[in-house]
């Protein structure tokens, strides 16, 4: 059995990662005869691991998939562990900022197509540690482009974000791909700056690029520093949810399976030199999100007052965009569509978050943890176990 397919009536965990039902997107396009070996940077992170899990079995006879990742603390080889023994899947432990590792991967696997997701993507951290974001997101992308320029490939897909458009006022039109970029936090600025580099290599050196700007992506396999898995795990531990400011900032949320389909569509139908927004119809404020999650875990909150009993107000970001948006009509014309609605996606995500915890041996004895400040302490042993497992796995794969 090459991998475990998602059963129709999936039971609640526990499974181990290698037994867990395989989560993929659902699209399939005519394979491109020009494409053979695809390097996917950050293949052990959330979105890219969904793309790896989708492309590897969907195009098993056509494409070899190489997951390239530096394995930061938010990464997990568990996300693709079911493919370790497949012939068309490889893992390459590498850093996009290290030229020898980038070139080593391009040469070893005869790469013809690159989907570049690797980044420092956490907005909150970027306010305090912005140099790291410039190094990884701008310099890292530059290194990739420089080596791709000399090595030569068929397609380079750069994964940007809707945050490059900056704040979109209530009632304003959703930005199209030609809108002016106006990022407002160091993370978004670094993504926009990297876009400029991508555009430059397209114009000056004819590197065949496509840029993709997506709304927020969530789903199973997301590391719990991001709001949905973080809040979900905190509720499970009886902790109050930390709310930035008033909690009325909204975001649009796209299920990772739909994001995988979007990248599959762009890989096969996107035009070189173009930009594509990937949007979601599901917009929710952070307080709406708290309400959804409370309902999912069965915590009653008949009134707003009840709801606020589960929340603790924390200091807001130095600047917190009220709202992000993007108009995805151009991608819809290539026949992509959002299939998973927010509540359904949240429900699936919540159940799957338990898999990681069970694997890390951290499901019990957490009831005494009473404040949000303990979350980091909870995560530390999980991360230590995860790092140890990764080391073992990496040494096996290398
Ligand atoms: N998550 C979202 O809501 C969202 C929305 C729009 C765009 N994006 C973009 O999508 C991409 C992936 O985001 P995600 O949320 O899946 O990330 P993630 O936090 O789940 O994973 C980041 C991954 O990048 C890897 N990485 C970081 N620096 C690296 C380096 N120098 N070399 C190699 N690997 C490195 C990490 O090890 C990790 O696997 C990012 O470029 C992000 O800007 C994310």
Image: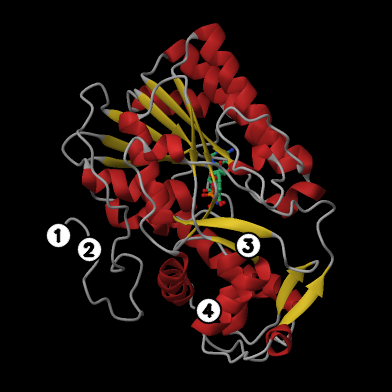
What is the number of the mark on residue 4?
Answer: 2
Q: Residue at x 66, y 38 (%)?
A: 165
Cβ–Cβ below 8 Å for labels 3 and 1?
A: no
Task: Tell me the distance, in whole angstroms, between the alpha carbons under discs 4 and 2.
Answer: 24 Å
Q: Secondary structure at mark 2?
A: loop
Residue at the spot x=23%, y=48% of the render?
57
Q: Residues within 10 Å of mark 3 (few under 14, many from 20)?
A: some
Q: What residue lies at 22% left-to-right and 58% top-to-bottom?
A: 3
Q: Do tag 4 and tag 2 residues touch (Cβ < 8 Å)?
A: no
Q: Earlier in the sequence, mark 3 or mark 4?
A: 3
Disc 4 marks which residue? 362
Q: Residues within 10 Å of mark 4 (few under 14, many from 20)?
A: some
Q: Residues within 10 Å of mark 2 (few under 14, many from 20)?
A: few
User: Which one is nearer the viewer's eye here, 305 or 213?
Assistant: 305
Instruction: Give coordinates of residue 20: x percent, y percent.
Output: 31, 68
Residue 103 in picture, x, y percent from top left: 47, 22
Does mark 4's beta carbon lie closer than 8 Å to ligand 1?
no
Callout 3 secondary element: loop
* Alpha carbons under labels 3 and 1: distance apart: 34 Å
Q: Earlier in the sequence, mark 3 or mark 1?
A: 1
**In this rendering, position of residue 85 left or right of residue 93:** left
How many labels were placed on the picture? 4
């Amino acid at each position: 059995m090459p991998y475990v397919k998602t059963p129709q009536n999936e039971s609640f965990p526990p499974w181990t990662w290698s037994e867990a039902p395989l989560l993929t997107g659902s699209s399939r396009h005519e394979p491109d005869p020009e494409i053979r070996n695809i390097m996917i940077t950050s293949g052990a992170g959330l979105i890219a691991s969904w793309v790896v899990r989708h492309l590897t079995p969907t195009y098993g006879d056509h494409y070899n998939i190489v997951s390239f990742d530096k394995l930061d603390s938010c990464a997990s080889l568990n996300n693709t562990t079911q493919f370790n023994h497949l012939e068309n899947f490889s893992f390459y432990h590498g850093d996009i900022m290290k030229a020898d590792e980038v070139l080593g991967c391009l040469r070893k696997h005869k790469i013809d197509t690159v989907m570049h997701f690797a980044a420092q993507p956490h907005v909150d951290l970027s306010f305090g540690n912005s140099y790291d974001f410039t190094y990884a997101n701008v310099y890292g992308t530059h290194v990739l482009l420089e080596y791709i320029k000399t090595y030569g490939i068929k397609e380079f897909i750069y994964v940007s974000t809707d945050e490059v458009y900056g704040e979109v006022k209530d009632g304003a039109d959703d930005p199209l791909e030609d809108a002016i970029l106006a990022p407002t936090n160091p993370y978004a600025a670094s993504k926009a700056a990297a876009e400029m580099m991508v555009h430059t290599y397209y114009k000056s050196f004819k590197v065949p690029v496509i840029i993709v700007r997506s709304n927020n992506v969530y789903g199973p396999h997301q590391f719990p520093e991001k709001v949905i898995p973080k809040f979900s795990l905190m509720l499970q531990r009886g902790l109050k949810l930390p709310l930035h400011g008033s909690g009325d900032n909204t975001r649009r949320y796209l299920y990772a399976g739909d994001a995988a389909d979007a990248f599959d569509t762009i890989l096969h139908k996107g035009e070189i030199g173009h930009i594509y927004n990937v949007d979601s119809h599901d917009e929710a404020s952070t307080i709406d999100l708290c309400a959804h999650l409370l309902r999912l875990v069965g915590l009653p909150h008949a009134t707003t007052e009840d709801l606020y009993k589960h929340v603790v107000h924390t200091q807001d970001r130095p600047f917190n965009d009220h709202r992000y948006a993007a108009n995805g009509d151009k991608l819809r014309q290539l026949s992509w569509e959002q299939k998973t609605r927010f509540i359904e996606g949240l429900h699936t995500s919540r159940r799957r978050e338990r898999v990681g915890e069970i694997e890390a041996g951290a499901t019990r004895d957490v009831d005494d943890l009473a404040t949000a400040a303990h979350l980091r302490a909870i995560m530390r042993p999980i991360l230590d176990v995860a790092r140890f497992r990764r080391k073992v796995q990496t040494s096996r794969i290398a």
